Amino acid sequence: MAKNSRKVIVSCAITGSAHTPTMSEYLPLFPSQIVDSAVEAAEAGAAIVHLHARTPDEGRPSGDPALFQQICPAVAERSNVVVNITTGGSTRMTIQERTGYPMRVKPEMCSLNMGSMNFSLHPLAERITEWRYEWEKPYVSGMKDVIFKNTFADIEYILRNLGEGGTRFELECYDVGHLYNLAYFLDRKIIQPPIFIQAIFGILGGIGADPENVMLMRSIADRLFGRDTYQFSVLGAGRHQMALVTLGAILGGNVRVGLEDNLYFGPGQKARSNAELVCKVRRILEELSFEIATPDEARQMLALKGRENVHFDAGVTAAIV
């Protein structure tokens, strides 16, 4: 097992931008709901919460700094959890829209997708007959013809502009080629170790949710980076979540759960909260004799700059909705 991996970091992705309100009545939409859900996940054992924003009227994905400012400072005030802000936003946003808030506040951690891809949930649109809001069906079905753009220039722009402020990254790798993209930036010292690789399985357009692929991504990461250079984490989409993250932990890695990635607690049973999913994975890991990392232990493992060096007052002032 890799050094320090006896302490498993649990990340929780609270709401995301792919699932829409119709898909689950438990998906946090309003800023106050996202805050409460993130704090509950932290209390359940998540060391890191991965945050997106949504409009409070119809739950659309949003990059509006004013909405993030309603969320991130409140989470930080109520919890010691690591606040991890998306730079992915959604497939419909420009890079400036996706990074507007992180560029202002320079958080401890941001997510960063390591390549362009046709990230798509469009088959879901074929199975849903009634939608809560008009925007949802064209948004989901339209993913079939939208490229989630993350060019080498985009990635370098984010690494340089946020990295200079001390932000470190959840490096989201949806396929084997994304590991090689990461190696390109590491070789050129545009990013420095330790690196935190979030290997993602089961998204249409990326690598499939097969156990062999988890082992493949782990072995290639070992060869490219050396196990002392990086922390490995696994994200399994949908029904694959718990099985694949458990395998990832057994292989010496960390885990990510949450309603962004999976709406179900079990077959046919929707998860009622992010905390419920955190509790489930924590129970599995502790039964396997793993210890759950605290937020401060995660900060040490990932060489984060510390919450005292994040100044959310650099954002924009807005009242909680």
Image: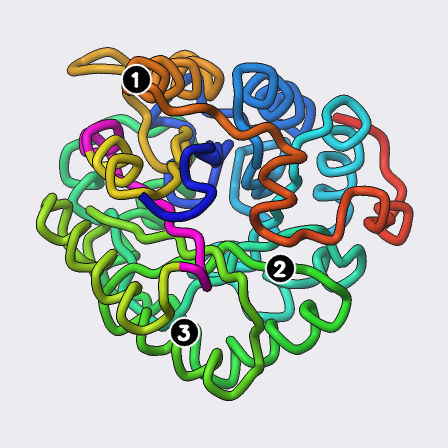
Residue 222, quarter of the rendered image: bottom left
Pointer 3 local density, CA inside 10 Å: few below 14, some 14–19, many at least 20: many
Q: Which percent across, then down, holds residue 294?
A: 60, 28
Label 2 element class: strand
Nearest to the observer: residue 14 or residue 46: 46
Residue drawn 18% across the image and 58% down it: 207
Q: Earlier in the sequence, mark 3 or mark 2?
A: 2
Quick check: marks 1 and 3 in contact, CB under 8 Å?
no
Query: Pointer 3: what residue?
Result: 182
Question: Distance from label 3 to label 2 (Cα)?
Answer: 14 Å
Q: Residue flagged by tag 1: what amino acid is it?
A: Ile
Any magenta on residue 237?
A: yes
Query: Pointer 1: what residue?
Result: 284
Residue drawn 79% across the image and 27% down it: 320
Q: Residue flagged by tag 2: what amino acid is it?
A: Arg
For residue 268, above or below residue 62: above
Q: Which percent across, then down, holds residue 259?
A: 40, 29
Residue range (magenta)? 228-243
Label 1 element class: helix
Relative horizontal placement of residue 23, taking residue 228 as reference (left or right): left
Any magenta on residue 22?
A: no
Pointer 1 local density, CA inside 10 Å: few below 14, some 14–19, many at least 20: some
Report the label total. 3
Q: Earlier in the sequence, mark 1 or mark 3?
A: 3
Q: Residue flagged by tag 3: what amino acid is it?
A: Leu
Q: Earlier in the sequence, mark 2 or mark 1?
A: 2
Query: Pointer 2: what residue?
Result: 168
Question: Distance from label 1 to label 3 (Cα)?
Answer: 31 Å
